[in-house]
Amino acid sequence: CEITKINIFQDRYVIGNTSETLLLGDLETLKLSEVQWHAPGKEKFVFDNPSVCMVYHAGELSLIEYGCNEVLGSVRTEHISGHLLSVRINERPPRQASPDDPNAPPDGENKQIAYLLDTQTINVKDLCAQASATVNHDSKVDWLELNSRGNLLLFRDKRRHLHLYDTESQTRHTLLNFCTYVQWVP
């Protein structure tokens, strides 16, 4: 197939199209990907994470890890703001599971996404195990972020309440009743 279009974003990321595939590359790490794609020209690209390109098209967000020739995962969402999406790809290894755990990720893989299903519902999806957890809330969520291991989710609502959700125990705790700024500290 012949490359029909090529663009460079942020002086770092290259996106190309053929009639049947989407080409993605990171010019700093020299990692390239080519995936099957049938909607060239109508996508929106999100480069908030240096490990993965997020491609939004027709209500579906697809994650493509640089250097891999398959779509890592896809989710349905209308909310693609950087404040309402959090992706963690192998930033820190997951906690050690027992060797006979069938849900244990292969070779310490840790790939997670947190995103909004609607303005009051968060979904946290493990892209390796294909497991997910849903967090229902009574107010509009205006910010969310996973920690580097992907097992804790911080989120804030429009009332400025700050909450912590543990994905392993599936418990939520209100940390602050008023919060104007929040960020994980490395």
Image (spheres, helix red, strand yellow):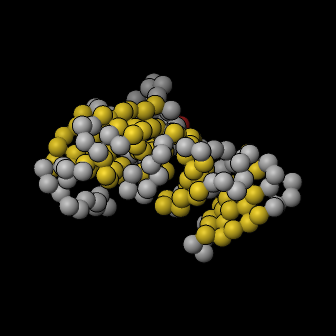
Given residues 109 and 66, the one toward you in this image is: 66
Q: Look at the image and tell me in which quarter the N terminus lies.
A: bottom right
Left/right placement of residue 27 relative to residue 138 reads right
Q: Look at the image and tell me in which quarter the C terminus lies.
A: bottom left
Name the residue furthest right. Answer: 1
Given residues 106 and 131, the one toward you in this image is: 131
What is the count of numbered marks?
0
Name the residue furthest left. Answer: 177
Above/below status of 28 relative to 56 = below
Residue 108 lies, in percent from the top left, at 48, 42
Residue 148 lies, in percent from the top left, at 38, 52
Left/right placement of residue 149 relative to residue 19 reads left
Left/right placement of residue 6 relative to residue 76 reads right
Name the residue furthest bottom. Answer: 11
Question: On the image, which quarter does residue 29 sit in?
Answer: bottom right
The residue that appears at 27% across and 37% down in the rendered structure is: 137
Question: On the image, which quarter does residue 8 sit in?
Answer: bottom right
The residue that appears at 45% across and 44% down in the rendered structure is: 112
The residue that appears at 18% across and 57% down in the rendered structure is: 179
Residue 89 lies, in percent from the top left, at 49, 50
Residue 86 lies, in percent from the top left, at 42, 51
Say if residue 58 shows up in the picture.
Answer: yes
The residue that appears at 19% across and 50% down in the rendered structure is: 159
Above/below status of 7 relative to 121 = below
Given residues 148 and 62, the one toward you in this image is: 62
Say if residue 90 shows up in the picture.
Answer: no
